Amino acid sequence: MSSSPSKMEQYWKKNLQTLAILLFIWFIVSFGCGILWVEELNTIRIGGFKLGFWFAQQGAIYAFLVLIFVYVVRMNKLDKKFNVNED
């Protein structure tokens, strides 16, 4: 076995790194902003609604949608870099 990681091993390592980072961000937004720091965030109002309430009800969903878009863009670039794209 060679000492350097294969191209596919590097690809999957980058893929898993991307997933871990995006899931961590989603966790911070949904659990942190929606549960842990809700009291502090509720001191801020947006459109008449407390920010902690907004994160718990809608913000985590919007963040998830943005993270999906980021994942798609990142994976398309990664696919092209490692020549595993489906084009």
Image (cartoon, rainbow, N blue to C red):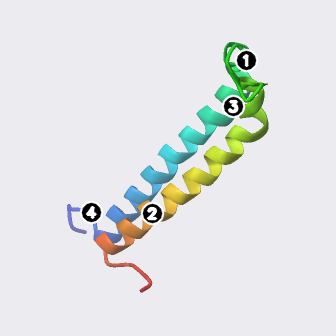
Q: Residue furthest front?
A: 47
Q: Secondary structure at mark 4?
A: loop
**Does 82 sit left or right of 24 as displayed?**
left
Q: Which residue occupies 58% across, 57% down?
A: 68
- In the figure, 25 relative to 34: above or below? below
First in residue order: circle 2 vs circle 3 = 3
Please state which of residues 78 and 63 is positioned toward the viewer in this rendering.
63
First in residue order: circle 1 vs circle 4 = 4
Please state which of residues 17 and 77 is positioned toward the viewer in this rendering.
77
First in residue order: circle 1 vs circle 2 = 1
Residue holding disc 2: 73
Residue holding disc 4: 5
Residue type (three-letter) at the residue carrying disc 3: Phe
Q: Which residue occupies 44% across, 84% down?
A: 86
* Residue 87 sits in quarter: bottom left
User: What number is the disc on residue 31?
Assistant: 3
